[in-house]
Image: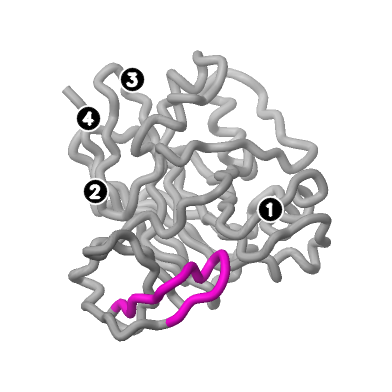
């Protein structure tokens, strides 16, 4: 099933995407029950929103070897690979939907980069689960772009603006609940219509099942929580006027223009 969150005259609503149409539902399918309504509209006419506003926004840290090596090389350091799955946090204020602009503060430096990622949406309250059970607690999957201003990331004591500035976290366009293998799907990066790179989730140092199991030993995951699973490779810089597309097998394409404030 394919779910979206879209704007209606009465406010945000969830909808089921069937073919080229969106059927509005009442309720919240991620956190509870829902009912289909008689309201339907063409998908092309729907203003899609961020597909979920998470109670907690988690992000896997340094989870692909090539990405760790490339970033270390740029700093002139030896790569340090993690001994255990590590978890960070991102801010909801940074979320924007498919098609919305990544608006870059005027004092940002030129090393503004994309990070295309698979996003996991939790569907059931989760505590102390095994890796074998982990995917039973997943509602579905979407796409994220962990936009990063590297100068701020390196020089601030935290990543409060390097990764969490307004609009730095595009997510969408929708949530797919089946047909995606989170341990073995391909992520592709396309910048201004030009294919840049690709990687497979099978190359993750720690997979989705491991992350959910490890996290649930120490904290409770709730319906609607999201886990961004990290990226691989060496991202390129983005500039004003660019359009960055992140494609994931079985889900679709997240596309956002870049607008640099003057």
Residue count near mark 2 (Cα–Cα under 10 Å), binned few <14, some 14–19, many ≥20: few
Label 2 vs label 1: CA separation?
A: 37 Å
Mark 1 or mark 3, which has the lower sequence index?
A: 3
Image coordinates of residue 233 in percent, x first then y, are 51, 43
Q: Residue 232: within the magenta?
A: no
Which of the numbered marks, if any, corresponds to residue 187?
none
Tell me how far mark 2 sits from mark 3, CA to CA: 20 Å
**Residue ID for mark 4:** 260
Magenta region: which residues?
22-35
Give the answer, above or below, for where 37 lies relative to 5: below
Give neighbour class at mark 3: few <14, some 14-19, many 20+ (Cα, 10 Å): few
| Residue at the disc numbered 1 | 221
21 over 237 or under it: above or below: below
Q: Is residue 23 magenta?
A: yes
Q: Residue 45: x, y in percent?
A: 18, 70
Residue 244, percent from left and from top: 31, 47
Judged left or right of residue 171, residue 55 is right
Q: Tag 1, which secondary structure? A: loop
Marks 2 and 1, the one that precedes in the sequence: 2
The residue depicted at 78 percent of the width and 55 percent of the height is 127
On the image, numbered disc 3 is attached to which residue? 109
The mark found on residue 192 in the picture is: 2
Query: What residue is rendered at 42% in x and 46% in y?
Result: 145
């Amino acid at each position: 099933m394919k779910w979206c969150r879209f704007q209606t005259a009465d406010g945000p609503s969830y909808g089921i995407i069937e073919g080229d149409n969106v059927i509005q539902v009442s309720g919240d399918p991620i956190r509870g029950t829902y009912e289909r309504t008689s309201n339907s509209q063409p998908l092309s006419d729907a203003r899609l929103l961020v597909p979920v506003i998470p109670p907690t926004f988690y992000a896997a840290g340094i989870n692909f070897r090539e990405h760790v090596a490339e970033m270390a090389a740029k700093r002139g350091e030896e790569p340090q690979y993690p001994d255990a799955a590590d978890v960070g946090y991102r801010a909801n204020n940074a979320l924007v939907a498919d098609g919305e602009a990544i608006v870059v503060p005027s004092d940002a430096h030129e090393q503004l980069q994309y990070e295309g990622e698979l996003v996991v949406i939790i569907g059931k309250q989760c505590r102390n689960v095994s890796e074998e059970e982990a995917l039973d607690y997943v509602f579905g999957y979407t796409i994220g772009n962990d936009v990063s201003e590297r100068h701020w990331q390196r020089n601030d004591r935290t990543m409060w603006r390097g990764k969490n500035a307004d609009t730095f976290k595009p997510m969408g366009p929708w949530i797919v609940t089946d047909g995606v293998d989170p341990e073995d799907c391909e992520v592709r990066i396309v910048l201004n219509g030009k294919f840049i790179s690709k990687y497979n989730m099978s190359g993750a140092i720690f997979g989705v099942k491991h992350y959910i199991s490890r996290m649930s030993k120490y904290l409770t995951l709730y319906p609607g929580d999201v886990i961004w699973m990290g990226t691989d490779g060496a991202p390129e810089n983005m500039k004003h006027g660019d359009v960055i597309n992140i494609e994931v097998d079985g889900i679709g394409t997240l596309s956002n223009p870049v607008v640099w404030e003057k």
